[in-house]
Amino acid sequence: MYLAIFVVVATAISGTLVSNRLRFSLPKHIFVSVFEWFGELGIFCVRLFRSALAPPYEFRELLRQCDEIGSLSLPLIALAGAATGVVMSLQTRDSLVRFGAKSFLPAVIVFSLVKESGPVITGLMVSGRVGAGIGAQLGSMKVTEQIDAMEASAIDPFKFLVATRVLACTLMLPLLTLASDFCGILMGWVANTLAEAISLRLFLENGFKNMLFTDFIPPTVKTMVFGFIIGIVASFQGMRTQGGTEGVGRSATTSVVLSSLFVVLADVVLVRLIITVWG
Amino acid sequence: MGSEQHAAIVIQDLRKTFGNQKILNGISFQVAQGETVAVIGRSGGGKSVLLKLLVRLQTPDSGSIRVADKEMTKVDEKQLTEVRKKIGFLFQQAALYDSLTVEENVAFPLSRHSEMSAQEQEKRVRELLGEVGMDRDREKMPSQISGGMQKRVGLARALALDPEILLFDEPTAGLDPITSAEIGKLIVELKQKRQMSAVVVTHDVHGAKAYSDRMVLLQKGSIRAEGSFDELEHSKDEVVSQFFDYGLR
């Protein structure tokens, strides 16, 4: 139910469906368009998998995309993670002091960063930076006939452009999440130690004392799903761009809106799944 | 039938619509081996769509397209790839990959479809860029060169795999008269040197006179006239004579 409402609202906000002419038949139009969108996305995914699995593989382009998506996103992700760690430390400290549970502060910071904040913030930041980039880049290539030129030269654009980007997003998200977690925990300690001095070693010992691999691995690995969503939605929006520079702008915007939305929705489903499987 | 077997391209009763708009309304013509056919006509007449149908960037509603002895409406992905390797396509805005240098643009099809070593590829790229007069701008990005230069690089890229057929979409559109003449001269030189079949979609009647063996005039999705430049120039058909009158002014 919530999923359906979210999808309809987000698609309408993203501006792909609403036109003045159709304002009066909007509900029906949105309903049909949402189904069309998912249908086209399904066909896009089938074509992508068919192209990606057949040799030859584009390893060089994959590495280039990993660099583009991974290392160039690192400063932003590190900064976002660090800011989250500081804010979490400042906000939680006050609450825990009131309840006489100040000693739990390291564990609260570590657990919340590793299990939820780190992965989700990384997902959303990457969907903003990389999603918009992929949507605009492929959109621009589409309207300037570069994708047609590639196809006419017997080069599969799904293999060269889409598969490499989707795979790079999927592979890079967990690594970026680790970087975000690391910076968050480190800056959480810095903020904590400025208020009340505590050694890094003691902070980490208290933070990780009760942490199990099942607390760490599934939330980190789930970001691969976020990466896949970001890559596929942004590539899809880019490859179906129409209408010149205005269309490119629209593709970039819808890539960010839709990939962010689906990352949040996927998080709800994945958290439920992780709790069901690992407790 | 015999002539069809020796034709590089055979189009029969080709139809294409977008929504309610009929773009191509049952057109048929052939391009013989080594022949250059200019497809002329007013904007929106379906000329560029015709070129895209020839390499199956779009699919027709009905009709038949035989390119290099393969029925393009029926080939599978593998066969399509093989046919496309035999076709060079120069797009209207050149469509150079903007993240690659001039040199990398030309090398791109070679790196994927040829067995050449890196050194052989480099040599081949230099030859091709030399052929179109762009060998001094190898390291530049597409955004750093003019529209005419982009067309030249696009042509070098289209020639990279030594195609049997060349397709030109408005090769002189948006260029000044001197650059247009230079591109036209380049097409004539290529025609003499390589003996390839070519389809040139253009508004430029002067240019088409120089490089085409035959002309096809498209009007509202149908072939209005077909023949040599002289035949069309002296046609008594009002539409044809009007097009040539304006085109040759």
Image (tube, helix red, strand yellow):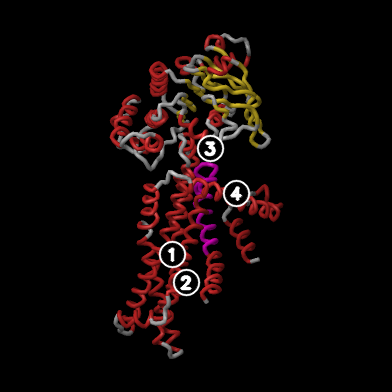
Q: Residue at x 35, y 57 (%)?
A: A71
* Cβ–Cβ under 8 Å for marks 2 and 4: no
Instruction: State the separation of the CA atoms marked 1 and 3.
Output: 39 Å
Q: Secondary structure at mark 4?
A: helix
Residue marked by disc 3: B77
Coordinates of residue B110 in the picture (x, y in percent): 38, 34
Coordinates of residue B65 in the picture (x, y in percent): 58, 26
Chain label for disc 4: A
B167 vs B109, left or right, is right
Coordinates of residue B54 in the picture (x, y in percent): 54, 29
- For the stretch drawn in magenta, the main secondary structure is helix
Q: What segment carries the magenta color?
A: A236-263
Res. A116 mark: 2
Res. A122 mark: 1
Instruction: Residue at the far bottom: name it.
Output: A100
Three-letter residue code for mark 2: Glu
Q: Are marks 2 and 1 on the same chain?
A: yes
